[in-house]
Amino acid sequence: MIEIERKFLVKSKTFLDDYTRCNRIVQGYLSSSPERTVRVRIKGENGYLTIKGKSNESGLSRYEWEKEIPITEAEQLLQLCEKGVIDKTRYEVIVGTHVYEVDVFTGENDGLILAEVELNSEEESFEKPEWLGEEVTKDNRYYNSYLSKNPFKTW
Amino acid sequence: MIEIERKFLVKSKTFLDDYTRCNRIVQGYLSSSPERTVRVRIKGENGYLTIKGKSNESGLSRYEWEKEIPITEAEQLLQLCEKGVIDKTRYEVIVGTHVYEVDVFTGENDGLILAEVELNSEEESFEKPEWLGEEVTKDNRYYNSYLSKNPFKTW
């Protein structure tokens, strides 16, 4: 229930040559407070409710609780969410022994591409593909909850 | 998924002669916004996550979504909640064909007793016991989410 992730900008679209799966993701926030975000997500044909605490000091670890819910319920809950729904396509790219999730944003966040890799410990090493750009793990502006209120196009 | 409830103050403790069950309830809020409250509750030995929308114009109907969750997860989520946990004992009292839920608050809301009855339609009639006081259905100060931030003792 503790999520360890590192997040990067993406500097080229060559990851599109190597992805294995992709899904449309539409998500909104019932709470976008970084101390207790409550997220409603539709990913492909599934619904999810996800609650996250604030990051630890290194910015790498964050408490996370998630339940799969019926898509019809997720659609109803999306209606309750704060303004600023996030719409993106997530590509899964296997690099070495890890899976990078590469999010290509549309709508108000068009132009932004972020890659995340999940680790089992903060010390775990991982291979960096050539399309990977600057690390932004500690930069809260790249939280989707922040982007929902402050879209990338307005930066 | 639409909850129709009427809420009343309670003017005497004679309901204690007639209750069938009671449970300790401890609850906190991940979002206390009336437009999208997200509540974590431990009731007896069970955990719940509940999301409610805002009330309709009459104040009687409110969208509600609820899932039972393991008590250990509810305890973890309570740690993330906003300040102001609600602690109360809920008594169930059968009156005619309805069940009144009577909440006796402790801690910062000590002195407050509220009764709620759930209806199938806004027009449904129901029997009123002698211990029932003033109706407060439309008064948002009696939302538990409001009480968590503005406890009864401070009124």
Image (cartoon, coloured by chain):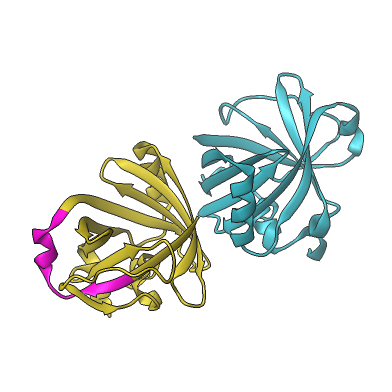
Chain colours: A yellow, B cyan
Left or right side of B149 for A24? left
Left or right side of B67 for B150? right
Q: Quadrant of the C terminus of chain B?
A: bottom right
Question: Measured from the top left, where is residue A55 in percent x and y?
Answer: 49, 70
Question: Measured from the top left, where is residue A75 in percent x and y?
Answer: 35, 43
Q: Is residue B61 above or below residue B26?
A: above
- Given residues B66 and A55, the one toward you in this image is A55
Q: Which residue ends up furthest to the top in the rendered image?
A: B97
Please tell me in which quadrant of the rendered image residue B114 appears.
Answer: top right
Q: Is residue B111 visible?
A: yes
Question: Measured from the top left, where is residue B26 in percent x and y?
Answer: 72, 49
- Given residues A115 and B69, the one toward you in this image is A115
Q: Is residue A151 visible?
A: no
Left or right side of B33 for B118? right
- Given residues A11 and B15, the one toward you in this image is A11
Q: Is B2 colored magenta in this rendering?
A: no
- Given residues A147 and B133, the one toward you in this image is A147
Please tell me in which quadrant of the rendered image residue B82 appears.
Answer: bottom right
Q: Is residue B39 above or below residue A125?
A: above
* Picture residue at 27% right of the left edge, 59% below the top: A97
Q: Is residue A131 above or below residue B33?
A: below
Which segment is the magenta one? A7-19
* Picture residue at 51% right of the left edge, 72% below the top: A56
User: How many numbered tags mark residues here?
Assistant: 0
Q: Is A17 colored magenta in this rendering?
A: yes
Question: Measured from the top left, where is residue B42 in percent x and y?
Answer: 68, 45
* Picture residue at 36% right of the left edge, 43% below the top: A47
* Picture residue at 52% right of the left edge, 47% below the top: B51
